[in-house]
Structures are given as structure tokens and as C-alpha cells.
Amino acid sequence: MLGLLQKIWMEVRWPVLWLSLGLCAIMGLLTALLPKVLGNIHQMFDKMPMVKPLLTALLGVDPGDQVSAQLSQAFLWVHPTVLTLLWAHEVMYCSRMPAGEVDRGTADFLLCLPVSRWSVFCSETIGWLVSGLMILSLGYVGHLVASQFVQPGMRLSMLHTLMVMANLVAVYLAVGSFAFLISAFSDRRGRAIGVVFTVLLASFLLNFLAQFQDWAKSISPWLSVMEYYRPAIIIQTGVFPWGDVGVLLASSAVLWLASGMVFRTRSICTV
């Protein structure tokens, strides 16, 4: 398994490094700028009424006529740029095996090595978890450094930040496990990437429509991962979302096990 982990390291080290530095920089910039930008958001609400429902969809709560300092920090954790970088890494990484190997014509060589398919799958899982931890950690460092330069009243407490991070990690696990499952069924990496991105975009759209349509609100808990990621509620109440995190972790476990079973039993051939 050590050889497999070295192979993974050689293949993904540079994309992971650049994504980590990118998330660090973006988290730092957003931490410093969002409280100032959102401080006058009420003027935008008057000129562009559709902005408020969009913020409500992202935050999971009604921001009211003005966005408080705490809610502005909550918006940081659901900012589309932050989620896009994180999910881009997952889609890139989790589509490597087996879809990427089959697409490149190298699956036969890799699977002929004297290791079981479960060893290959577990090695990929370890690389996914470690790389995700690195990206999230550097993103948190960027937030932590930038928060030292904002007014004390605009800073989140360490406890609130860690609770939001834990919820975000659960989202990371759920999305990555789903990407592994789609990849396990696919023979083309581009197709697997397209399916996962389509589902994630649909999740965003459904979460937005749930603010206006009852039918979308009723099915959102079943089809939208954003239904279980509400940093604003965590920050406002100070209560850890055990139920939401539990659903995400349970979904992750089921999807991951299904991915491993499909990868272990399916016929894989590049000819």
C-alpha cells in the first residue's frame, strides 16, 4: 500500500498544493472584505430584490434588512468560491479511480499489481482524506490570519468556527463519497466529472427554489446536500448540528461502501 500512496502523492501533490494556497488566499480575502461589503447590503436589497432570496438560500436563514457581523462571517463559509474550490478538488481526485485510469488506458497495468482492489480503493481513500484535510486546514489558516485584522466584534469565536468546520468536513465526506460512487460506475472521467458537477449545481438550484416553491422545499432534504450545511444557524444558536452532521456521515458511509463494492466486483478493462 505504501507504493500506492507514493503513486497518489506524485500525481496529486501539485494540484492539492495550489488549491490549498488558493483557498487560503480566498478565505483570507473574504474574511477581511465581507464585513465591509455586506455592511451596506440593505441598499442592494432595495435596488436588486432578488439578492435577498439568494443570500437566504446560501445562509439558510433570513438575513433581515441588514446583515450583521456574525452573518457576514457565516456567508464566508458558504461562499460559492470556497465551495467551488473544495468541490473541484473532490471531483478531480475522486474521478481518478477507476474512471481516470480506464480513460487513460492504465487500469489494466495498475490492477495487475500484486495488491487487492480493496487496497487500491483504501489507498485512494487515504489520499482523499489527507489532501482534503490539508486544503481545509490551509483555508482555516487564511481565515484565522485575516481575522486578526478585523474588528473584534466581527470575529467568530474558536468554538463557533470549529463547529462550522466540522459541518463542512461532513459535507466534504458526503460529496467525495458520491463522486467515488459515480467514478466506480464510469469508464470515462469526463462523464463522471460532468455527472457530479451537475448534481452539485442541481443541489444549489434546489436549495434556492426551496425559498419560493413548496415542492422544492419538500424534496430538498432528500436531494440537496446544502440542506444539511447551515453555518449561519450554528453561529446564531451556538448549537452543534448533530442531526445534520449525522445524516451527512451516514450518507458518506453508505456511498463509500457502495463505491468500494462496485469497484471490487465490476469488470474493468481498457481494451
Image (cartoon, grey):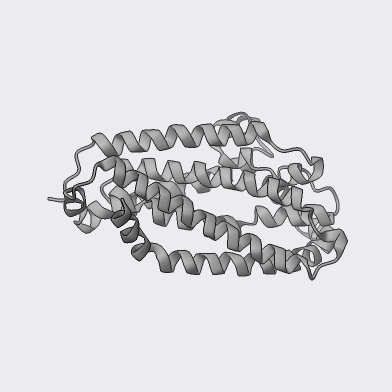
Q: Residue furthest front?
A: 2
Which residue of the protein is positioned furthest toward the left in this rendering? 271
258 lies above or below 29? above
Task: Tell whether 12 sits left or right of 251.
Answer: left
| Residue 38, x across and y down, in percent | 79, 61
Q: Is residue 208 left or right of residue 62?
A: left
Q: Quadrant of residue 31?
A: bottom right
| Residue located 37% across and 40% down the image | 181
Query: Relative to the observer, which residue lies in front, 93 or 78?
Result: 93
Image x and y of residue 252, in percent: 49, 37
At a point 65% along the width and 52% down the height, the residue shown is: 78
Residue 43 visible within the image:
no
Decide if residue 157 is on the left or right side of residue 80. right
Q: Say how many tags the image has.
A: 0
- Counting from the top left corner in percent of width and height, residue 127 is at 41, 53
Residue drawn at x 75%, y 42% as measured from the top left: 233
Residue 224 in sight here: yes
- Image coordinates of residue 58 in percent, x first then y, are 67, 48
210 or 261, nearer to the observer: 261
In percent of the image, x 79 and y 71: which residue is there? 149
Q: Could you say which quadrant of the image residue 21 lies in? A: bottom right
User: Where 3 falls versus 119 (above or below)?
Assistant: below
